[in-house]
Amino acid sequence: MPTPAEKEARAERARRRRALITGELVPFGSIKPAAYLAHSPAERLAAATRLVAYHMKIRGDVRLPRAEWPGETFKCGRESVD
């Protein structure tokens, strides 16, 4: 059984975590407005870029040039039939 001090420490940790959570309550069945609806495409791209950079930073990722990304290269086109 946890002691009252352990229960209080756990509750304090939960309060600190909740303070860091950013979110929005949307009632069931209602449509949530787009977060960046009033922004230009350039502003939306900048926000997405900041978000990706932030997540890469907290994961400890290193930015790689596009040529070094994993994946396959596909050449699309038509084959000539003789």
Image (cartoon, rainbow, N blue to C red):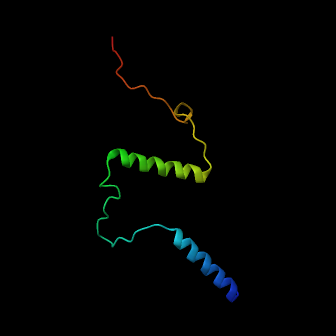
Residue drawn 54% across the image and 52% down it: 55
Quarter of the C terminus within the rendering: top left
The residue closer to the viewer here, 32 or 72, is 32
Q: Is residue 36 left or right of residue 6?
A: left
Whether residue 36 is visible, yes or no, is: yes
Up/down of 3 relative to 45, above or below = below
At 33% across and 73% down in the image, what residue appears? 27
**Residue 2 showing in the rendered view:** no
Q: Position of residue 43 (x, y in %)?
A: 37, 48
Give the vertical position of 19 relative to 3 (above or below): above
Instruction: For the N terminus, give its image quadrant.
Output: bottom right
Q: Residue furthest bottom?
A: 4
Which residue is pictured at 29% across the width and 70% down the height?
Answer: 29
> Picture coordinates of residue 67 (x, y %)?
53, 30
Q: Seen from this angle, which residue lies furthest top?
A: 82
Q: How many marks do you count on the picture?
A: 0
Relative placement, left or right, of 33 versus 48 is: left
Residue 14: percent from left, percent from top: 58, 76
Question: Residue 60, position in %: x, y?
Answer: 62, 49
> In the visual, does 58 lie left or right of 6?
left
Snapshot quadrant of residue 79 = top left
Residue at image x 57%, y 37%?
64
